[in-house]
Image (tube, rainbow, N blue to C red):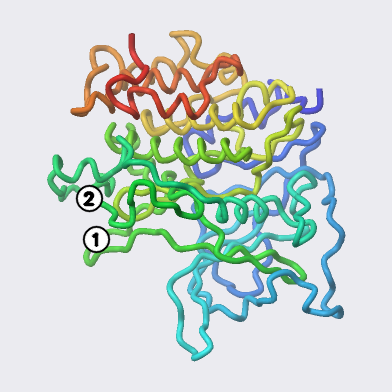
Amino acid sequence: MLLRLCSHDPRLRDLRVWRVLRSSRQRVSLIAGRVSIAPIEPPSPVLPHSIRRSDSSGSILSVTPSTRAPSPTAEKDKGSFLGGRSISDFVIDGEIGRGAYGLVKRAREIHADGSLGPPLVIKQVIKSRILADCWKKHPKHGTIPIEIYVMSAISNTSYALPPLRPWDPSRLTSTTPKSTDHHQPPLQAHLDDSWIEGKVVKGHPNICPLLDFFEDNHYYYLVLPSTTPEQLKNEPPPSSDLFDLVETFPQGLPASSIRTYLGQIADALCFLHLQGIVHRDVKDENVVLGPAGKCILIDFGSSGLVKKHGWDTFSGTLDYAGPEILRGERYHGKEQDVWAFGVVAYVLLVGECPFMTAEETQEGLQSPFANASIALDERCGEGKEHDDEEADGGGGLGDAAVLVRACLQVDVAARPTFEKILQCRFLAGAGGWGME
């Protein structure tokens, strides 16, 4: 048993603090049961000022070394670096966040004529902290981080747009007047003129594309589009991701919002799994919000290609780790993504993570007396099963609870695939599976 986590481990026993202060949730990497605490913040050669979430914690990192050969040194030919670009080609507008793995910054590219391009996001990944199982040999670029390998592959995969999905935010336009309540999520939308059924695009609309990447001695740089909704005049800043949005809804989001976001996340993960890719770090912080109710899956630093025999290492957040991982068993990434998706769904419904301890995770929602089961029933049961049901039969709270319980099955084999999840009544509407 390579991932030996004991229930008396203080990191697992006292998850109550993580539940109350959600921003303190730690990303962990577990390899052969050995963990150590890494520094919270990497050095920043560009910006002295740090913009970060409050109560941010460090990550627990495996001490297993990287398997990649050292990158070229400054004395060697600069042309040997991937990408042939430099961070000096960009103006840095500010820092979005930082952690043990790297930094994320707002930036604009400097054009040849001196003008600045549109807003971008640059993710700087610290080479020395990339874990041993997070590298992949690329036929053209050699050994590169799995994050770049996967994002590059996704961004170059053709995808034929299906008909607008039942959960598309534009469904609310004709039936819901524009709200003046600033506590409501920004779901009202116009139809996207670029969404034409059958149109072939690159990548998936709900997965962050990789625009470019390059490296220097210390970092890999990922150039990503900026998706944050524009701040309106005299309005508070919009939530940047589901993490922020949940913080403004301590009792859970409106069901129509939950249907919109879960549908897009499930669609993105279904696309990934069909390409033989697993995310392995699905959580609300890794779903950023775009304009008009759109959301986008980000952060592929823990992703991987499906393995026949699964993994005996885990790099993610314990709150979202399935019971098989906490038991130290080999696991397959698809089923772990489904479990984590179920945790996200629960968080959107109830406003907090479902399990406070490793013991609770092992029990799941099997007992009606479990705290998580009681809280889910309070939101979705007790006569409220058909509350918020939409005209097409989707979006009902009772069906939302059925979806959560299906994903949070302790028995790995009992969890649905994302193809089946997309067919549930909560997302797909009448005719889908849900309450009996």
On residue 235, the disc is: 1
The secondary element bearing badge 2 is classed as loop
Q: Are marks 1 and 2 in contact (CB under 8 Å)?
A: yes
Residue 251 image offset from top left, x and y in percent: 32, 32
Residue type at mark 2 is His
Whether residue 371 sits left or right of residue 317 in the image: it is left
Vertical comparison of 354 with 385: above or below: below
Residue 196 image offset from top left, x and y in percent: 33, 51
Vertical comparison of 28 with 349: above or below: below
| Residue at position x 83%, y 80% in the image | 77
Quadrant location, the N terminus: top right
Please state which of residues 119 and 100 is positioned toward the viewer in this rendering: 119
Please state which of residues 374 and 81 is positioned toward the viewer in this rendering: 81
| Residue at position x 77%, y 42% in the image | 62
Vertical comparison of 236 with 418: above or below: below
| Residue at position x 72%, y 33% in the image | 307
State the image quarter where residue 73 is shown.
Answer: bottom right
State the image quarter where residue 303 is shown.
Answer: top right
> Between disc 1 and disc 2, whose residue precedes?
2
Reading the image, the residue beneath label 2 is 182
The secondary element bearing badge 1 is classed as loop
Vertical comparison of 23 with 307: above or below: below
Residue 201 image offset from top left, x and y in percent: 45, 54
Query: What is the total number of numbered labels drawn onto the structure image?
Result: 2
